[in-house]
Structure formats: C-alpha cells, structure tokens
Amino acid sequence: MRIAGSIAIALGFAGAASASLHPRSQESRDFFALHLDADTSPDRVAQVLGARHEGKIGELAGHHTFSLPREKSSDFNALLKELQSTRKLRRRSGLTAPRNADPLEGILWSHKIAPPRQRLEKRAPPSSSYIASRSNPSLSSRVDLTAQNEIATELGITDPIFKDQWHLYNPLQPGFDLNVTGAWLNNVTGQGIAVAVVDDGLDMDSKDLKPNYFPEGSWDFNEGSAEPRPLLRDDKHGTRCCGEIAAAKNDVCGVGVAYDSKISGIRILSKPIDDVDEAKAINYEFQKNDIYSCSWGPPDDGATMDAPGILIKRAMVNGVQEGRGGKGSIFVFAAGNGAVYGDNCNFDGYTNSIYSITVGAIDRLENHPTYSESCSAQLVVAYSSGSGDAIHTTDVGTDKCFSAHGGTSAAGPLAAGAVALALSVRPELTWRDVQYLMVETAVPVNVDDGSWQDLPSGKKFSHDWGFGKVDASSLVEKALTWEMVKPQAWFHSPWLRVHRSIPQGDKGLLSRYKMTQDQLKKANLAKLEHVTVTMNINHARRGDLSVDLRSPSGIISELSVARKSDNANIGYVDWTFMSVAHWGESPEGEWEIIVKDTQVNEFNGDFIDWRINFWGEAIDAAKTHLHPLPDEHDHDHPYEDPHDIATVSVDPGPVKTGAPENIDDHHDRPINQKPTSTPKPTVTQPGDASKPTDENPTDDELEVVNPSPSTTISNPPTPSSSSGSDYLSSYLPTFGASKRTQIWIYASFAMIIVFFIGLGVYFQLQRIKRRRTNPNDDYEFEMIEDEEEMQPMTGGTGRTQRRGGELYNAFAGESDEEIFSDDGHDVYHDRLADISEKDNEDDPSPNSGLLSEKP
Ligand SMILES: *[C@@H]1O[C@H](CO)[C@@H](O)[C@H](O)[C@H]1NC(C)=O
Ligand SMILES: *[C@@H]1O[C@H](CO)[C@@H](O)[C@H](O)[C@H]1NC(C)=O
C-alpha cells in the first residue's frame, strides 16, 4: 500500500493542478467506476487520487464515477491494479483491511470505463417484399367479425385499428393471439404498473400514448434531459414498442396489451453511450418502473458474441435485488433477429442472462419466423411479423399508426405487456415468480415439429419456442393464485480442467460433473430454474464449435451451435451460456458437457476448462442471502477449492472424496482450505493432471460420440500448486522424491503452464485491443429490427423456412452505405409511413388491415 499511496499522492498534485484546465469531455479524460465501502467518502477518494468525482452510478449503491486527465490514467490504472491485488491477497489470507485513514482502502472494486460506443445502424428490412405479401391472395377471406365487435363493444374499445390488431384478438385464425381479451373483461388492464421501454424514445405527444405517459419514470440518456422525445428521423422504434404495451383505449390507433398501465421512455439508442449511462438506464427509477422492455442487443449477424459490460451486469443484478421494493425489476429482452444468419440467442449476453426474460417470435400463422433466433435461454415466444402480416401499433406523430412493426423487437413488448397485467393483480410477485408464471402458462405450439423435449417437470421445452407462446389470460389467472417461490439459491462448481484437443467431425469431447445430494443440501438448493455454464475453449474458428449440455435425466440443452458466419479465431473466453431447459429438474447426478468441432478442416482447438452453475429455489428460505454482484472473471482460474474438487467425478468408478467437514456454508467458504479427507490417487502421469488413471485411455478413447456415455473425459481432482504438501501427495505421483522436491517439480510445471496461459492471454488481449480500435467494430447496440419482417408466406413450416438466406441475398451487391445511409432510412421510413397512413385513411371498411386485398 505504500507504493500505491505514493503514486496516489503524486497523482494527487498533478491531478489537482490540471483538473480545472480540462473540459468535461471524454476526449481528454479517462473515466473509472469505483465501488466504495459505506465508510468511504467519494470526495475524499477523489482528493487522494487527484481525480474528479463525477457522480453516483445510478442506483448501484456505493458505485461512483471518477475521471482524470488522460495522461494520468495509466498511473491510475496501475494504482487500481495494485489495490486490486492487495485486496485479493488479503481476501485469500482472510485478513480484513486495516481501518486507517487511507481512503483507498475503501475501494472495493474498480473498473475503467470505455468511451461511449456507437451502435450500428438499424437494419432496414426491404419493404418491397412486405408490399408484395400484403396482397397475397391466399390470405384473403371473408371473416365473421361478430365476436370481435361484441368484445370491442363490451370493453368500450373504439380504437380505429383495434380490428387490425390480430395479435390481441384474431378473428381470422381463432386462438392465434395473446388470449388477452378474457383478462380485460375481468377488468385486468395493467392499472398501477409502469413499463419502461428502453429504446430510442417515446413520443409523449402521440394522443395514443399521452394518457399513459409516465414522465417520472422517463429519461433521455442520449441528450441528458428529462423527456425521452424522439429527435432523430429514425427514432420510431421505441414509440412503436410503447404502443404495443400501453396505447390507450381511445379513438386513436389501437390499444396496448396493458392499456391502463403507465409507460415510460428511457432513451439510450440514438447516440453512443457508455456503460455508466447504460447501467443507470436499466435501473432508472426502479422503484417506480416495474418492467424494462428491451428490444435491442448486440448485432445479430451470426458472427458477434457480445455481452454487457461488468457494470451493466452489476446493474441487472442490482435491478433484480433492489428494484421494485426488493421484488426485482422485470427485464424483458427480444431474442434477436439473426436466425437467417445462423445466429443464436446464447451468443448475446443480454438474452442469455438469468435475469432477463428472453422472448422470441411466432407469426400469425404460428410459423417460426425466419428471423427469430433459437436458443436454450429462450423462455417464451410472442406474436410478431411473418406470414404476410405484422404488428399494428402506434407510431411517432400525434395520431399516427404503424402497421408493419415486426421482428423479435415486436414480440418482447407483447410479453412485457402481459407481465404488466399479471403484476397488476399480484404486484408482490418477485422477478423469479414472473419467470415461473411464464413457464407455467406458456402454450406449446407445433408440438410435432421435432423441436420439443418432454421435461421431468411435465412441461415441454423447445429451443425454437421456449416453453411456448405467451397466453396473457392464463398468465393473469395463474398469477392470482400463485404461491410465491422461496428465495434464490445457487451452486457454483469449481473450474473443471479439461485441456484436451477437440476432435473434428461427428465426435465430441465429453466432460462430466457430478452433483451430489450432499452438495445440494449444503448449497440449500431444492430444484432448478436456470443452469449456466462458463467455459474456455481455444479455437482457430469459433463458428465450428457446438456445445451440448446433458442433464442427469437426459434433457439436452444446446448451449452453443455452429455458426457459419463466425470466423473469429478466438474460441470462447470465459463465456457464459444459459439454459432454462432444466427448469424444475433436480440437479442431482451426472451432468455432461459435449464439445464438438463440427467441421473437419484446418481450424482446430482445445477445450480448456468449464464450470457449471445451478440456480434455483432454496430449500430453506431463512438461510438464503443475496448473490454477490458479479466481478470480472479471474483469469488465473484457481482450480483450488477443495470442497468442490472433492466432488469431481471420475469415470469409471467415481472417486468420492467427501467434503471437508468444517465448511458448512459453501457460500462463505474459505479459499485455499485443505481437504480434511484425502481422495485416492487418480493420476499417474506426471505433469498431466487431467488424465484419469483407471484406464489410461488413449486419445481415441477420449473422443466420444455424443450421446454415448460409455467413454468419457474425466475430471480428476486438480489441485493447485499452492495447496500444501499433504494435499499434493494425496493426489499426485511422488516421483519418489521428498515433499519439498515434489512441490518444486509441480511448481515448475505450474509456472510453465502459467507462462503459456499468460502468453495466450496477452495475444488475445492484443487481438481484442486491435478489434476495439477498429471503428467498424465499434458498436454498442443494434436495434432488433425485423430482418425478414415481411417475408411473403410460403406455407412451409418455420423450421425449414428460417434457414433461408433470402435477406442475405437481398443485400448482396449493396454496400453498407447504401443500406444504412440516412437517405436509405428516410426512403424506407417514408415508404412505410405511406403504407400505414394508407391503412388509416384509405380503408374505411371494417377489418381493413386484416390481410384482405388492397386496392
Ligand atoms: C385463454 O384464456 C382463458 C382464460 O381467460 C383460458 O381459460 C384459456 O385456456 C386460454 N387459452 C385459450 C386458447 O383460450
Ligand atoms: C377495475 O379495476 C380498477 C383497479 O384496478 C378499479 O379502480 C375499478 O373500479 C375496477 N372496475 C370495475 C368495473 O370493477
């Protein structure tokens, strides 16, 4: 700390002198987020560091932004690193920080903030195919509108485009809608609930939104102003999403799913934004806003693998822990529109978060839209564009409507609206109760399409449809009598070392983890909700990889799929995949992960390590506590936890080693504790701790064809070199040497490995750095706009349709400039505006928008 202190003092003088000379601009200053303990004043920290305190980070308790002149920030960085390693050392040695006058001791966590990044432009779908499909004769027919009219009359709905809002009530394809009118007839309309649409703005002057507009829950993070008014020509997406949720019951356009709920606009997508503002945005007024509807994410190009920054991850956890009076903010995310590019929502860190409800799309004929991404993290689907129609909603303008809203962008808000209805009758439901209710009431669709698995819980799950389509009335009905679940518990496995090359072709590399009854009890975990797997794979072509997870009861989660456009030569770096497919299962037993390199080619790689995390309902509510905020991954994966190492299974004849007796609370387990019982030795080959002894299998035997469980890669205990001599000798060969010499031998191996890992990390960092500085990769968000929103109906099933490459071809030959240029947008939007205006003005006939032939 002495060195740190002196750097700080040096910085202090320089910083104080220059602070006033620099403008508040990202160009000349670097920004840092610091988490301070409750006793540490940010002003004092700023003073000691010579930094400027820029303010609190939204609702994240103790988190503050500091800035200092760019030329000072590398010293500052070094200081923070040193503080961090001091903290780590202290944590490991079980010491508490000395409470002296040094305020730097109160820094719990630090993170450098990257400058605001520019999101990619919206991908404007070609509108011509939409126009063509509108006149698809196969869809026009005479419809009996009596029932629809009766419902409208009974509810007093006079909104002119209600008759077009098939997603609310579908007279043409009965039952292919949200089934919401039953809830409305029971006077469940979203009263008292506020939904925030985090997007590109909310037109509060629209007569359809004005009655429900909630200024207190709204903010414009792009302009730093209170009103999230759409300013760019392009800022229409958010308003359209708002209309789907909370368009008022009046004489303008249609109605929202929860037409008496309040609607907030949180504007973040119209300018570059940094992680601090994004973190603030998703916690914005989280005691007043109940639901955050997010129809955006990293690019859906089938090549991107991107997750929210650590600060945003913290804000999401903060949202579910502290928002809504501790019941938890509800985050709803659109699954993504990249299915045509082979994209999958497990490559998006927002949609594969356990804290978000991931919503894919289903079209009006219950087909799987070609754009809608599948993945094991998808919870439900809701209606959107495809098969010749789209979502009819409110648009920017005092009384403007829009008839071509689509993509998963349009599906997410419908689910958010349904949740608003459920919360309006049971506001005390937690964020996990809401996910349970979605699981319980979603309606499986196309059950014979081969995508469904029967789960031990009695539910069905499909990677294409999640648990099925959202049914608003059932959701509300179930919510009314729902017995709330106990708090969340979890179990994090140790890092499981594999370090093997992955066979190419049909074979896969299998690794197992055994979860015991004992561990479950210690973790206070009753049954599963989410499963996450964090893994490291080095590979020369990421898109060749696929990963399946198999539960003890044989349920398969496709955690990762091969992606033809993904040429990244980086593999997976501490990436976390998520699955909801094991919801309700018992985690007890053997879990298998199968990694495949699907292409036989010159690109290959190694499966380094993984860990599995089980999240679910607690056994004993009294013993639960909140999960700590996420931290950056520790890149020197310790493989060190004796409690967990003891549970690693070895096949055949699992080596059960028993857990250390003196650890009763696994959550507060001490680090580097020695095991109290010693496992029998399992490794004979010096220097390769990952090879099991019982068989001494050859490499060929280790390559197993999924799903044959007969041969396996086992995960024998993998002690770290720091674990002490007793520990060491019990696991590893002795070379006939003294303990001292053994330690020396193993330490040497460890250092060599660490050196190469370090080298690898260095080169990867260099790569990442290069990519970061490449302006083409400088994105933050991309709107999830419908790729093939307006695909003409082809009558085939969704599964075959969505692999098509039509859109790709549609763009062929056009440069990005042509597609994304402002001019292009204007043309596009004007054209679409024309369509929607026509809908409103030229079609006095009842049910005019309903797929009937246009003049
Ligand atoms: C629709 O909601 C009602 C309750 O209002 C429920 O009884 C029914 O099963 C739901 N589903 C369908 C397809 O009608
Ligand atoms: C409908 O519910 C609201 C509160 O949610 C209540 O104020 C109103 O009186 C109810 N109306 C009827 C007809 O029950």
Image (tube, rainbow, N blue to C red):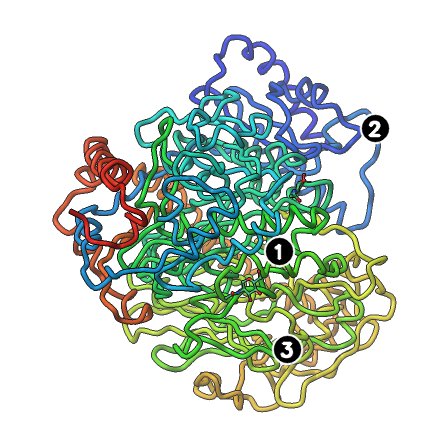
Q: Mark 2 highlights which residue? A: 100
Q: Return the residue nearer the eye: 17 or 252.
A: 252
> Is disc 2 placed on a helix, strand or loop?
loop
- How far apart are labels 2 and 3 at the CA level? 45 Å
Q: Mark 3 highlights which residue? A: 716
Nearest-to-viewer mark from 1 and 2: 1
Q: Residue at x 46, y 18 (%)?
A: 25
Q: Mark 1 highlights which residue? A: 476
> Is disc 3 placed on a helix, strand or loop?
loop
> Is disc 1 placed on a helix, strand or loop?
helix
Relative placement, left or right, of 347 versus 300 is right
Name the spot of residue 234 as percent of width and height, x first.
Answer: 31, 32
Query: Can the viewer see residue 190 in this picture?
Result: yes
Q: Quadrant of ligand 1?
A: bottom right
* Amino acid type, label 1: Val
Q: Residue at x 31, y 40 (%)?
A: 122
Name the spot of residue 849 as percent of width and height, x first.
Answer: 29, 48
Image height of 221 relative to 14, above or below? below
Name the spot of residue 147 as percent of width and height, x first.
Answer: 43, 57
Circle 3 residues within 10 Å: few <14, some 14–19, many ≥20: many
Image height of 489 relative to 185, above or below? below
Confirm or deny contact between disc 1 and disc 3 (CB under 8 A). no
